[in-house]
Amino acid sequence: MNKKFLKKLGKRAVLLCLCAVLLGYAVPKWLLVIPLQAVSMSESDAQTLKKMEEELAILKEKRSMARDQYQEAMDAYDHAEYDYMKAYDAKIALDADISALETEINATQELLNVYNTQLTYYSTAIEEKQAEIDKRYGIFLERVRANYEDSFTSYLEIVLSSDSFSDLLYRVDIVASLLDYDQRVLAALDTAKKDLTEMQTEYQSLQFRAQETLTSLTEQMPLLEDKRSESAALLAELDQKMAEAYKSKETAQEIKQQIESSYNRKAAELEKAEAEIEEKIRKAQEEAARKAREEAERKKKEEEERRRKEEEERKNQNQTQTPPASTVTTPGDSSTTGTLSASDVVTGTYIWPTESSYKKVSSSFGWRVGLYGQTEFHNGIDIPYAYNSAIYASDGGTVIIAEEHYSYGRYIVIDHGNGISTLYAHNTSLLVKVGDVVKQGQQIAMAGSTGDSNGNHCHFSVRIDGSPTDPLKYVSNK
């Protein structure tokens, strides 16, 4: 395959590894540290990998949609649950109203029962009083009839027919007693009539109050039934809404689980395919390394032979020859390095990638909650940084990636040798390109917030054989 295809394939492999890191999968070692010219992949392998990547991308999109649908279902369920709680509070208030109305109805019923008892009592008392009046009236009529038949002269004859004064007094007492008896009969009759009138008045008053109470009770009973029906209907509606919301949530959760299962299965297949290709590339690397060693040995011998001949010639000509100067890259210079090699700039130590006044870490290495509430693995550290501020190479090495990514934005990866590489993401602009050899502390980019970012910062990552490790093990923010 030609170099252009290999370079394109290498970039695609790097993009794939970065996606895998974001999704929590281990990064294949060969994706970041292998020189592009050492990759050797067959057309069939490339096509298989491409097809699997496309299938995984489709599943990823479906998984994202399923998560959104599940979140919407969860929101709807939470909203329904909140509405249910509010409506349930309303139902409790309604039930309290019903309870109060029932208590009032019971009290009204009890009062009505008391009225009925009193009415029964007064009805009986009136009948008894009427009988008493009738009896007294009969006695009164008999006395009237007797007086009428005897007339007043009878009383006079009784007095005048006395034989002596003492007999006269006796006869006067008898007449007085008869007259007093008649007065008492009339008085008792009058009192009984007054009592009857009072009883009839109280009876009528009780009848009126009892009728009012009965009317109130009659009006309250339908209201009570309406409130009971309202409470039952409200509870039935709430139960139905909760059941529908719960069913929607369960359905969305099942779909989400099915799609995630398919996604995980496809990701495992892709990982297996990557492992197989990695093994092929590893063997190709070993072969390339062997050939490189042989070529280096050959060139070394040629160089030694050339130097020996030059030395002999210099001695013969008695002249000093000045070796050609090498151009180097100074901090802040984005030009290429000329004859400078990676081995000349790698120090094995690492410095903070931003200005020393910016050493705050806003998001550490490890598991965290992402921008959209999802749990994700953060493969580096985030350093809040001013827009367009300088980003420096943590150590010297060769730039192997300098491009734009949907998540990292404009980012750079530097290979420091021995399987160690560093990554600088979310830059607003890049000052170096692939193949450049940079020195430790050289400015390589300008800070920004490109890609999947919510503010200006530098995402700094350290990888050992392609696997992310905590950058604070290599650099210090103290």
Image (spheres, rainbow, N blue to C red):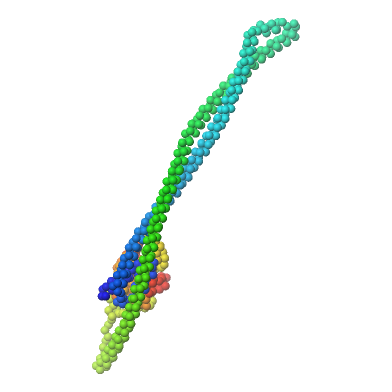
> Would you identify the image quadrant in which residue 256 lies?
bottom left
In screen coordinates, is 228 left or right of 166?
left
Residue plotted at (30% across, 68% down): 50
Q: Position of residue 443 (x, y in %)?
A: 32, 72
User: Eyeballing the image, is 266 above or below 151?
Assistant: below
Q: Nearer the viewer, residue 359 or 85?
A: 85
Q: Position of residue 280 (x, y in %)?
A: 34, 76
Residue 393 visible in the picture: no
> Would you identify the image quadrant in which residue 423 lies?
bottom left
In screen coordinates, is 19 left or right of 203?
left
Q: Residue furthest left?
A: 317
Residue plotted at (41% across, 55% down): 250
Residue 184 visible in the picture: yes
Q: Nearer the viewer, residue 215 or 44?
A: 44
Q: Position of residue 316 (x, y in %)?
A: 25, 94
Q: Residue furthest front?
A: 44
Labels in figure, total: 0
Q: Pick the quarter of the image with the N terminus.
A: bottom left
Q: Position of residue 116 (x, y in %)?
A: 55, 30
User: Eyeballing the image, is 416 above or below 118?
Assistant: below
User: Eyeballing the image, is 379 above or below 238?
Assistant: below
Q: Pick the quarter of the image with the C terminus.
A: bottom left
Residue plotted at (40% across, 57% down): 253
Residue plotted at (31% across, 76% down): 39
